[in-house]
Image (cartoon, rainbow, N blue to C red):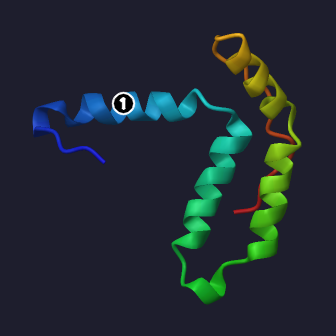
């Protein structure tokens, strides 16, 4: 949530996109899917599907790498998509 002058908007948007893109691909795709799904009316959200997606993210090697990188104070090296996430 930022308010910036119009002249600074593109730079801020680019910085935010780069920050998001630096995260694990599986987590980024999962987060996008979760936001898209939860923006729908409550009755249309498929909770079991979102729970399965969360479980896949937590079972991924990227999570292990993220924790290791945090402990070692370095940037993580995300590698996995681990299959197709439904849209």
Vertical placement of 40 versus 6: above or below?
Answer: below
Asked where in the image residue 61 lies, by quadrant, the reply is top right
Give x and y (percent) for residue 50: 75, 65
Q: Residue at x 75, y 74 (%)?
A: 47
Residue 79 place in picture, x, y as percent: 78, 26
Q: In the rendered image, which quarter contains the C terminus?
A: bottom right
Q: Nearer the viewer, residue 38 or 13?
A: 38
In screen coordinates, is 16 left or right of 58? left
Q: Quadrant of residue 77?
A: top right
* Residue placed most toward the observer, 67 or 36: 67
Quadrant location of residue 73? top right
Query: Residue placed at 81% from the left, 51% from the top?
Result: 84
Where residue 64 appears, as percent x and y from the top left, is 83, 28
Q: Residue at point 40% right, 34% down?
A: 16
Name of the residue lying farthest toward the bottom:
43
Vertical arrangement, residue 82 with respect to residue 49, above or below:
above
Seen from the viewer's position, the closer of residues 66 and 49 is 66
Pointer 1 residue: 14
Picture layout, residue 4 above or below residue 69: below
């Amino acid at each position: 949530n930022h308010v910036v002058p119009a002249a600074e908007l593109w730079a801020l948007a680019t910085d935010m996109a780069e920050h998001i893109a630096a995260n694990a691909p599986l987590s980024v795709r999962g987060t996008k899917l979760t936001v898209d799904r939860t923006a729908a009316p409550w009755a249309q959200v498929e909770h079991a599907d979102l729970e399965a997606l969360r479980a896949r993210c937590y079972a991924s090697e990227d999570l292990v790498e993220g924790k290791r990188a945090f402990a070692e104070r370095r940037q993580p090296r995300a590698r996995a998509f681990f299959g197709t996430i439904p849209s």
